[in-house]
Image (spheres, helix red, strand yellow):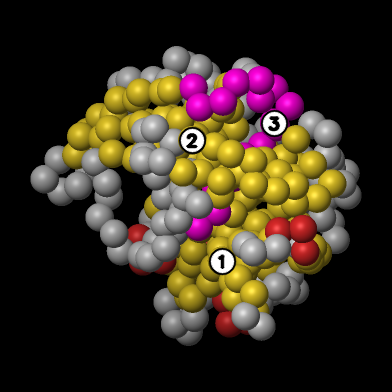
Amino acid sequence: MSLSPVVSAALVTGLVAGLGLPGPAEAKGSLECYAEVPGVTARGVPTTFVYDDGRASSQTRGPDDLGYQPRDVAYPHEVGEGRAAPTSSHWFTLSGDQLREVTEVDERDAHGVLVSARYETRVVRQHWAGARQISIGADRSYLYVLTNTDQLLRYRLSGRDGDTSVKLSATVGVGFGSIGTFEYARTATTGGTRSEVFLATDADSGALLEYAVPVDDPTAYTRTELAAEGWLGMQSVGRTASCLNTRSGRSYDGIVAVDHDGEVVLWTDRDAADGLGDDIVRRGVLKAAWKPLSYSD
């Protein structure tokens, strides 16, 4: 399942002014914004937080449930936009000491609206208690794993959906023990080097970071600090949001985060691919307390 931002899906009139928050001059008009966050309820029912047309809601993907609340979730990210909502999808969870593959089968009405969902899970690997976070890169090629021993590992995903195998591909590096959230953001090519780029937060310093991991030489990763502080206490942080200024016509990439109290907050980023953080602006709280456990990916 890929949770992609939709720029034109919602209208928020005077979002900046309404929340009483400062912003750049070109962003003080009306904003069209959309944001979503994947989560799972305490009963194990997958749920998506959606901010749409100034309204916050939870879209529960039941009535079936996983039978557990995952420690973390990883969704594949397919290249390309505008694809129809799939009737089935495949994603991964951490549960206890197991890595599990989930097959989600959706029933939709004639308008493509989700009616119900059911789930099948299978154990892919056991003895994974040392894995604390997982994220999948572009096109379901690699699974990245943060461990309790401060490592970032990369595993190769192979086989057909629903029967995926996982094999260690590389130790990307060590020294990742303070990373609080870790989410695939995009794939970039610079100087002929293709890298998978991850948005991360540092749980000790509150910094917002980007890691670029070269596909062909993962140990040559780079770390960029987008903001030195302001991102402490985050449960999930992801680029599953976007905005459009209806007066100027300027579009903005977005970042949506959920802290450990369930507060959902929106930021805009003038250019998510520029590797800079001086254009990231906090827009305000979308919901005071969202109860499901949220995930960065």
Task: Using the rendered view, name the quadrant where residue 209 is placed.
Answer: bottom right
Classify residue 174 as left or right of residue 201.
right
| Frontmost residue, 161 versus 51 | 161
- Horizontal and vertical percent position of residue 99: 56, 27
In primary-sequence order, the first of circles 1 and 3 is: 3
Is residue 153 visible to us here? yes
Q: Is residue 143 magenta?
A: no
| Type of the residue with mark 2 | Ser
Residue for point 39% across, 20% down = 65
Up/down of 235 relative to 182, above or below? above
Q: How many residues crowd around disc 1 within 10 Å: few (fewer than 14), some, or many (20 or more)?
A: some
- Horizontal and vertical percent position of residue 171: 75, 47
> What residue is shown with label 3?
131
Give the CA separation, mark 3 to mark 2: 17 Å
Q: How many residues crowd around disc 3 within 10 Å: few (fewer than 14), some, or many (20 or more)?
A: many
- Horizontal and vertical percent position of residue 280: 68, 68
Residue for point 56% across, 66% down = 187
Q: For numbered disc 1, what is the local secondary structure?
A: strand
> What residue is shown with label 1?
187
Q: Are marks 3 and 2 in contact (CB under 8 Å)?
A: no
Give the CA separation, mark 2 to mark 1: 23 Å
Q: Quadrant of the C terminus?
A: top right
Which stretch did the figure color magenta?
A: 123-138
Is residue 290 visible to us here? no
Between tags 3 and 2, which lies in front?
A: 2
In the image, which disc is placed on residue 165?
Answer: 2
Residue for point 46% across, 43% down = 158
Between tags 2 and 1, which lies in front?
A: 2
| Type of the residue with mark 3 | Ala
Q: Are marks 2 and 1 in contact (CB under 8 Å)?
A: no
Classify residue 46 as left or right of residue 289.
left
In primary-sequence order, the first of circles 2 and 1 is: 2
